Image (spheres, grey):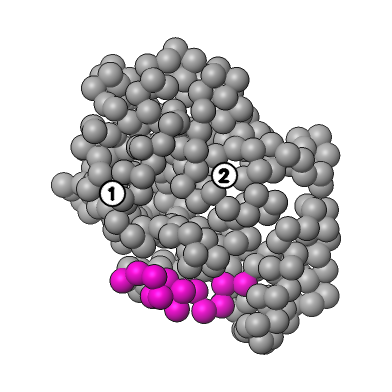
Amino acid sequence: MKRAVVFAHYDKQNLVDDYVIYYLKALKEIASEVIFVSCCNVENSEKLDGIASHIIAEPHNEYDFGSYKRGFLYLLPRLDEFDELIFANDSCFGPFHNLTPIFDEMDAKNCDFWGMTKNKFGINKHFRIIEYTQPHVQSYFLVFKKNILMSQFFKDFISNIKHEEIKSDIINKYEIGLTESLVKEGFCYEVYVNAYENVSNIAINKWRQIILEHNMPLMKCSLPRLINKNSTTVEGWQKIVKQVSDYPVELMENNVKRIPYVRKGRHTSPIWLKRFLFDTLAPCPFIVRKISSLIIAKCLPFLRD
């Protein structure tokens, strides 16, 4: 099985962080080539020596999908050399486990593409407080098999990615749009962590459970960075990671300390209370979760990390 990885990167300080190097080394174990595409001018690209087969570093304002496009176009002249193409990005810490058994398991499944998780829901592009059923494989980790790579439809879809002003439009057009369009073309997909069908974005709202109970090898960076603290609690995340893996959590801690916008939590409420609250809210309709997060942020800040 010959695989190529297109890895999307962005860093406000123009650096390749050590947690990214760890992730890339793990991907290198299951892929013959890693194409590193950064949406910034990387200042310490020497850290990629011996890991990345090719580096593209240029601001492009097209987010991760713009980086995926650039790496894909670089590989396009010899795409037929590969059995699988992986799109991954730096929005996750990990992996906490060897990726080879995961790929062995997913390669045995009858599917044309797969990801780590899917989200059953999307946000209505006109009424952005309305959520509706729109299943899609989440784009932080996508694997495409050869029949998709060789399809003209896939080549055209990726080649036509462009800048979008609003993040929700990126999700609707490219993340959700890619899954929906491939399915309409007759391709089928699977997900590695197939759980919590009625919970939106399990990578955030059920992060603890999927790591502990479903062998999830990745953790979204936004969690320890306290970006999602109106939606979930991450208190004790180090213990969770250490419980399932020997992954060096100091890589995560150092990154969190380096990110300038991260605010250290005060943990003023008991952890059991926060877990109960957010686990109760997780399966609720989007409008309920949205109102609850606003109330928590404005009126009940002691319930946040």
From the image, tell me which residue sits under label 1: 100
State the image coordinates of residue 14 (x, y, percent, origin top left): 38, 52
**Residue drawn where x is 18% and y is 48% of the image:** 49
Image side of residue 51 versus residue 184, left or right:
left
Residue 113 lies, with reference to residue 182, above or below; the image says: below
Is disc 1 placed on a helix, strand or loop?
A: helix
Q: Report the span colored magenta.
A: 233-246
**Residue drawn where x is 83% and y is 68% of the image:** 295
Q: Name which quarter of the figure residue 150 lies in.
A: top left
Disc 1 marks which amino acid?
A: Thr
State the image coordinates of residue 17 (x, y, percent, origin top left): 34, 59
Indicate which disc, 1 or 2, sits on the residue closer to the N terminus. Answer: 1
State the image coordinates of residue 183 (x, y, percent, origin top left): 57, 24
**Residue drawn where x is 65% and y is 34% of the image:** 172
> Is residue 189 at least partly visible in the picture?
yes
Q: Name which quarter of the figure residue 70 lies in.
A: top left
**Residue drawn where x is 41% and y is 58% of the image:** 217
Decide whether residue 244 is among the magenta residues: yes
Q: Nearer the viewer, residue 183 or 24?
A: 183
Q: Residue furthest top?
A: 152
Q: Nearer the viewer, residue 43 or 283?
A: 283
Image side of residue 227 versus residue 297, left or right:
left
Split into 4 quadrants, where in the image is the N terminus? top left
Decide whether residue 99 is among the magenta residues: no
From the image, tell me which residue sits under label 2: 118
> Dot 2: within a 10 Å radius of its alpha carbon, few (fewer than 14), some, or many (20 or more) residues?
many
Is disc 2 placed on a helix, strand or loop?
A: strand
State how many labels appear.
2
Disc 2 marks which amino acid?
A: Lys
Residue 104 lies, with reference to residue 286, above or below; the image says: above
Image side of residue 238 versus residue 85, left or right:
right
> Is residue 221 at least partly visible in the picture?
no
